[in-house]
Amino acid sequence: MSDSEHDAASRSRRDVDREQLKRTTDDLLMPAVYGQQDLVLDRGEGVRLWDVDGNEFLDAVAGIAVVNTGHSHPRVVEAIQEQAANYVQSSYYFYHEPMADLLQTLADRSPGALKNTFFGNSGAEAVEGGIKLAKKATGKSEFISLRGSFHGRTPGAMALTGQNKYTHTFNPHMPGCYKIPSPNYYRYGDRFADEEEFGKWAAEQVHEVIKYDSNDDVAAVVVEPIQGEGGIVVPPKNYLPYLKEICEQEDILFFADEVQTGMGRTGKLFAVEHWDVDPDIMTLAKGIASGVPFGLFMGTEEVSETMAPADHYTTYGGSPIACAAANATFDVIDEEGLVENAATVGDEALDRFEELKEDHQLVGDARGKGLHLGLELVEDRETKAPAEEGAKAVRAAAHERGLLVSRCGTHGNVLRLTPPLSITSDEMEEMLDRLDAAFDDVEAAT
Ligand code: PMP
């Protein structure tokens, strides 16, 4: 046993009263632990997590696309520790090196003409700021977003979110937010000749909203390049370029929410790059700082210069620790070739998904890009009736077999795999062996 293995093993023998810890959390946390993974965490390393009982799990959740560099990457840990020992005060009052470095990296690496960044603390907060930026830059107040979308749980982000299971108890929402259909060909494409015709129709719904619903006051179209919570919805090839073209025609901003798809997740640094579409506004969070709370929005110079200092501010914005973690995250992504790895291992996984689909009737559709992967489970392949219970059962069986996956989709019937981008082909193979076995377990029990 190596030293680090020995240390880890002795740590996991810590005397943790697991049941008491869970009771306290269930009693005091508002509202409750989200409930998908019933385990008490001890530690993580790479694609693996251990619970306090010493059980090892392969983690295909990664905090939902957060720890793209793998759990507790030494480089990121070191950057956080060094920065914490140096200075930690919040940033908008000061200049400091980690923030300047990160601003430069973002300006250099982000798509198209995006240039200026505002730093906040989460995905929802980034979206909220993006809404303000779009309003300020255009002097308009309406928004178009997509059914099946998810943009966060703060009031503005909820108004954009196209899944009422997350939003209905908080009506009424910010007015002037209209929804167009999700470009989900598997679910809604049947009556179209092909994906292209469907993609065109789905994008053209922007014109319909402008004609029939809006007050001629639309500031932006807000879109996740690949819907995440909505079920890993990869749009038809022509969809995003055409949507962008329509935004230009209608003189509205193109606002890409890359909170889940950014930072290499889909096999490009930013998902819009798959379609060569340049946003006017873009949000990032999750993978940006390998787990340190961080979110940001960017704008082109033209859009950003409309913001005055008093328009937006947050105490922790540009936190030196978060910036240091983000800088280290970019370094690890580059040095370890994680974007390329996500593309390669993702393609291998998609091949193996086809086998899963052949072997298991529950799998209606298998899709994704890079390591943003989903299996949509259905009761019946003809009717495509969503198999939410089936998805819960396979997720639970996978957990029993030491594999953590999450569920998403408007019907909760999509198994989502978003492992760290550092995953090897062998580790992915092992994950999919366990998933295959989990399907067998569920089939054997029914
Ligand atoms: N936008 C998208 C696309 C997301 O996937 C999420 C989180 N699932 C959010 C915004 C909100 O992020 P956060 O949970 O950090 O507020």
Image (cartoon, helix red, strand yellow):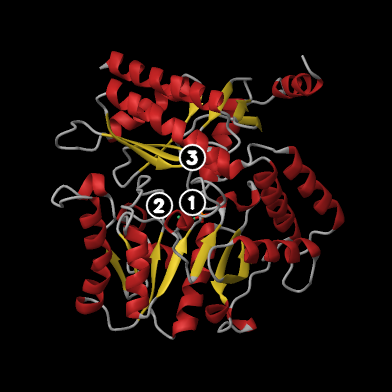
Kindly identify the residue that appears in the image at 86 percent across and 56 percent down: 86
The amino acid beneath tag 1 is: Thr
Cα gap from disc 2 to disc 1, whole angstroms: 7 Å
In which quarter of the view is residue 321 placed? Answer: bottom right
Cα gap from disc 2 to disc 3, whole angstroms: 12 Å
Q: Earlier in the sequence, mark 1 or mark 3?
A: 1
- Whether disc 1's CB lies below 8 Å from ligand 1 is answered yes
Q: Which mark is residue 261?
A: 1
Cα gap from disc 1 to disc 3, whole angstroms: 9 Å
> Mark 2 near mark 1, Cβ–Cβ under 8 Å?
yes
Which corner quadrant holds the C terminus? top left
Query: Residue 6 location, x and y as percent?
Result: 77, 19
Q: Which mark is residue 226?
A: 2
Kindly identify the residue that appears in the image at 45 percent across and 60 percent down: 276
Kindly identify the residue that appears in the image at 45 percent across and 53 percent down: 274
The amino acid beneath tag 2 is: Ile
Q: Earlier in the sequence, mark 2 or mark 1?
A: 2
**SS class, disc 2:** loop
Q: Which mark is residue 371?
A: 3
Query: Residue 79 location, x and y as percent?
Result: 78, 48
In the picture, measured across the screen, residue 205 lies left or right of residue 246, that is: left
Q: Residues within 10 Å of mark 1 (few under 14, many from 20)?
A: many
